[in-house]
Every structure is written in C-alpha cells, then in structure tokens.
Image: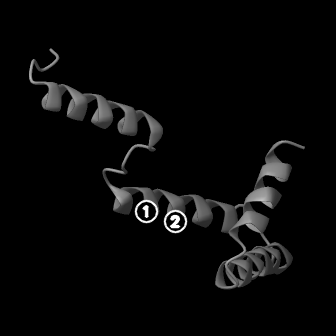
Amino acid sequence: MPSENPVDALKERVIDTVSKMLPPIEKDAEENRVEIWNDLSRVYYKYEGEDWKKAFRDVMKEISDKITEERWETIYRKLYREVHA
C-alpha cells in the first residue's frame, strides 16, 4: 500500500526503481562457493589420466593469470564463446 506522505511515497518509488535495476544480493555467498568447488572437483576428476589433469591445471593457471592482470572480460568472452558455439 503506497504511503500518503509525499516524501515516503517518493522514497518507496526510488527504492522500488533501484531494486529493479540492481542484481539481487546473494544471500549465502559461502554456499555458492562450496557449489563452485564441487563443480570444479567434478570437472577435475571427470577424466582419468594425467594429460586431462594437466590440461585442467593449465586452464586454471590461464584463468588465474588473466584475473591477476584484471582481464576478466577476456575470461567472460572465452566462456561465452564456448557455451554459445
């Protein structure tokens, strides 16, 4: 129910507008991190053999290097291309 006070009504509209523009706040970031570690573990152990494990480590190193260089956009583009190829 909208407020009858003009200042409160404006405040409600601003909050509503901003909440629609911003992404939702993660409620439990630790839970998300645990799930990501689980996914990475499944990928690492998905294939047998040192060649596959070395490839995984190489990819993780490549990603780590780009993060260190603050080149996130490069990682995002590569991931997007792989999924949408």
Q: Would you name the residue on which mark 1 appears? A: 34
Q: Nearer the viewer, residue 16 or 5?
A: 5
Indicate the secondary structure of the residue bearing disc 1.
helix
Residue 2, above or below 54: above
The residue depicted at 80 percent of the width and 57 percent of the height is: 77
Residue that appears at 73% across and 79% down? 66
User: Horizontal placement of 8 versus 36: left or right?
Assistant: left
Which residue is under mark 2? 37
Q: Can you give x and y, in whole percent of width and height, for residue 53 in the image? A: 76, 76
Image point 86% across, 78% down: which residue?
51
Residue 44 on image: x %, y %: 68, 68
Percent across and percent down for residue 82 are 84, 51
Task: Answer whether residue 45 is visible to the viewer in this image.
Answer: no
Within 10 Å of disc 2 (Cα), the crowding (few <14, some 14-19, many 20+) is few
> CB atoms at circles 1 and 2 under 8 Å apart?
yes
Q: Quadrant of residue 60?
A: bottom right
Q: Callout 1, which amino acid? A: Val
Looking at the rendered structure, the kind of residue marked 2 is Trp
